[in-house]
Image (cartoon, helix red, strand yellow):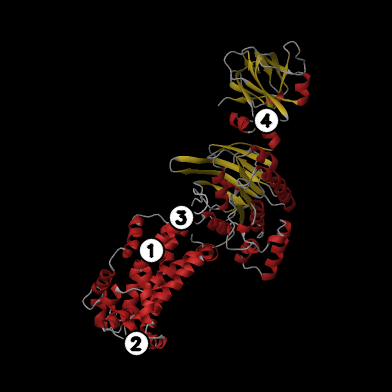
Amino acid sequence: MQYNPEEIHVTPMDMGGSAMSVIGLSKSFGDTPVLENINFGVDEDEIVVLLGASGSGKTTILRIIAGLEMPDSGHVVLHGRDVTESPARQRGTGVIFQNYALFPKMTVEANIGYGLRLRRRKRNEIRETVDRLVELVELQDHRTKYPSQLSGGQQQRVAIARAMAYEPEVLLFDEPFGALDAQIRQSLRKEIRALLKKLNVPSVFITHDQEEAFELADRLAVLNAGRLEQMGTPFEVYTRPETEHVATFLGAANLLDGTIRDGKFEHQDVVLELSPDNPKCREGDKVKLVFRPEDVFLRRPENLTQQYHQLATGTVDEVGFAGSYERVTVTLDLGKHKPIVVTRPKTETAAFPLRVGQSVTAGLVRYRVIKAA
Amino acid sequence: MSNIRHVRGFDLAKPLSIGVMIAIMLPLVLLPLASIFIFGTSNGLDNFWKALMAPEAIFALKLSIVTSFWATVFNVIFGLFAAYVLSKYNFWGRNAIIVTISLPTAIPTAVAGFALLLLWGPYGLLGRLIEPHGVHIMFTAWAIILANIFVTFPLAFGVIKPVFDTMNQSLEEASATMGATRWQTFWHVTLPGLRGAIVTGALLTFARAIGEFGSTILVSGNLASRTQTAPLYIFAKFNEGQVEAANAIAIVLALFSFVIFSILFFARDWLEVD
């Protein structure tokens, strides 16, 4: 079936999607909605990461793209072909399952060649492809082994090679690093990103780990309770979060309630100018000020220079060592309010050591205003 | 098992407990088995061999092997199919079917034979319909196969079903996303994972079928060289006072079981059923 864009109402936003797109996906299990109107796309050679907590619906999206689950409404389009009604086997997606799902009774070679054997390719062709892939994922010494004889990282490489053998339209990764320990995860992430970039395959990853999302993604999509809250490059999403969930899920964020007055953010005595890249706000809107711990600078009350936006004075509650930086909590003199978290690099801590109970003034280098939910 | 030693030096508990175990097994299992071998060969191996080579004895053994073989083939294929259906689909009455499949183990085998007669016999529910057309089931080898199928019905299913249940569903999903039809997935992915369970189920079924007596004696007619299986032959010869002839076949059956259970024990890594 040819996908006709005029028949489908697409939310107007820059979704990308020349290789793969999902349009208006919704699904409920019984009365519980798991997905609500999900739209996004993946370009050729792009890596998109769906980031969300468990229960956010990210796995369901992946399974719908693969054809392992049916949406209640919406479409899955692969290279211009609407595959929503096609069974999994006719879609030509490559799925890397969380536990890799390697066939235990097949050798590495047989696992990799399986998709080609199903497609009745010539024996020579299968052998050449398997050879090429075994080399690509550097498993030459393990090609006749069974999955149970391989390490987690090796199994994962087999899973990727196996999914790539039949030139899938899109590669789908279901939390592929979940089963590995922290050190291996990090090196594998780099390896896999490099590999995917070399191959130019459109890929979708799902993960709940924001560090992983930052490292892998060309663009990332943040999911919350079945909704796609924001999509953009990791830098965009981190520096310009549009919702409270996005702000707090991606790294730490301090929040301060306030109102728009005279086009400025206002909270008691705190008044901050709004830069043009903030979301459009109207006079009197309830908003939240969002600022990252690393964007706060602490000074002696009299010492705050012009380069910072004055926030408020306060008292140091806690000073904690966190390896490469120092983590400080400060209670601002703003009445009842949650203490803010500040992280300070070594240069700062050396120039201005802090102790508990000390009075400070907090200035911001960067902040953002989001609409209150 | 804990290997903590509470006693320094010689620990009496070990030889003592092993000794007690063997002492209990001796009159209950070991001596009865031994007596078969002792009596069977007490008149010399020549006589044993002669008893074994009697045409009636050979026929009985062959009939037992053939009928047990077909019952095994049927029950393994059905067990596989039933396990697939019952693991994959949830439907009304599913649990009732699982219980029913397991029933034949608990029913006295004589009742099983009796039940088959009531169904397929000349005046049975179905027998009444087919007998006038000259089709006879009871008192033929078919009856023996039916009896064997009935009494060994749950064995293969019972071994295969749990393996099916614990099988990783994402293997089948992976196969589907790679382009496999259901049948290809079953053939290339599911079936190889069940290899051990299938072989184990088959061996257990065969071992149980070849020794079946109670149902067979009712449905077969027990005609020497026609419908007499090895266990029936043993019973007939014993009744005629030919203990040696009975023993010769008994030894063969005992060896069969010994081989089958040795395979099940020593090949359990390969069979993956621990």
Assess whether mark 3 and mark 2 are in contact (beta carbons under 8 angstroms).
Answer: no
Q: Secondary structure at mark 4?
A: loop
Q: Earlier in the sequence, mark 2 or mark 3?
A: 3
- Residue annotated with mark 1: B23
Q: Secondary structure at mark 2?
A: helix
Q: Earlier in the sequence, mark 3 or mark 1?
A: 3
Q: Nearer the viewer, mark 1 or mark 2?
A: 1
| Residue nearest the viewer, comparing B85 with A351 | A351
User: Measured from the top left, where is residue A14 in percent x and y?
Assistant: 66, 39
- Residue annotated with mark 2: B56
Q: Is residue A225 above or below residue A105?
A: above
The residue type indicated by label 1 comes to Ala
Q: Chain of mark 4?
A: A
Residue A79 in view (yes/no): no
Left or right: where B182 falls relative to B134 = right
Asked if both marks, 1 and 2, belong to the same chain, the answer given is yes
User: Badge 1: few (under 14), some or many (20 or more) residues near its Cα, within 10 Å?
Assistant: few
Q: Secondary structure at mark 1?
A: helix
How far is disc 2 from disc 3 in space, using C-alphas? 53 Å
Asked if both marks, 3 and 1, belong to the same chain, the answer given is yes
Asked if both marks, 4 and 2, belong to the same chain, the answer given is no
The residue type indicated by label 2 comes to Glu
Q: Residue furthest left?
A: B123
Q: Chain of mark 2?
A: B
Asked if both marks, 3 and 4, belong to the same chain, the answer given is no
- Residue annotated with mark 4: A240
Q: Chain of mark 1?
A: B
The residue type indicated by label 3 comes to Leu
- Residue annotated with mark 3: B12
Q: Secondary structure at mark 3?
A: loop
Q: Earlier in the sequence, mark 1 or mark 2?
A: 1
How far is disc 4 from disc 2 in space, using C-alphas? 92 Å
